[in-house]
Amino acid sequence: MSVDRGDEAVEGFAEVLRRGWSAAGPPTYGRVRTMSERSDLVGSVCSLPKSTVHGVISGKKRQQLPQWRWVYSFLVVLREIAKEDGLDPDTVGTVEEWNARYKEAALEITERSRPSPVGVAVEIWSSPKFQEKDAPAKV
């Protein structure tokens, strides 16, 4: 089974998430959920249910990138956990680093989903409505 660049981009970004999770301990899924619901973080992060975190980390629920708000929340929670455990939160990564990786993956997926000009031309030229007079001039 072949893997396209879009799938590779999603898997590559999932690896970024896994590395951040590992750098923060790795914490339990329950601790991530509890931290996301901590009163001083409520409003700035979304809730991170254990099943969702597990699905994303394990790669079982990823056929597309998670929404940026979820990624941001996950990063903030991991950095808070790292701080609580006496770890340098920058080993988890910064918002700027994760946002840049997220944008790279999103761009790669977007570019992959666009049809290539050659593919479009082949599709048009092989169409039953295509007429010989519509063909490009021979040089």
Image (cartoon, rainbow, N blue to C red):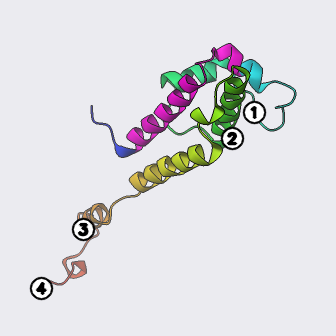
* 112 shown above or below 139: above
Q: For mark 4, does the 10 Å Cα neighbourhood hold few (<14), some (14 to 19), or many (20 or more) residues? A: few
* 72 shown above or below 1: below
Q: Which residue is mark 4?
A: 139
Q: For mark 1, does the 10 Å Cα neighbourhood hold few (<14), some (14 to 19), or many (20 or more) residues? A: some
* 22 shown above or below 95: above
Residue 24 percent location from the top left of the image: 61, 24
- Identify the amino acid type marked 1: Cys
In-front residue for pair 49/84: 84
- Indicate which disc, 1 or 2, sits on the residue closer to the N terminus: 1
Q: Which residue is mark 1?
A: 46
Give the foreground label among 3 and 4: 4
- Identify the amino acid type marked 3: Trp
Q: Quadrant of the N terminus?
A: top left
Q: Which residue is mark 3?
A: 125
Per the picture, the main secondary structure of the magenta-coloured stretch is helix
Q: Which residue is mark 2?
A: 69
Using the numbered discs, state the Cα–Cα distance from disc 3 to disc 1 in whole angstroms. Answer: 49 Å
Proximity of marks 3 and 4: CB atoms separated by less than 8 Å: no
Proximity of marks 2 and 4: CB atoms separated by less than 8 Å: no
In the image: residue 13, left or right of residue 122? right
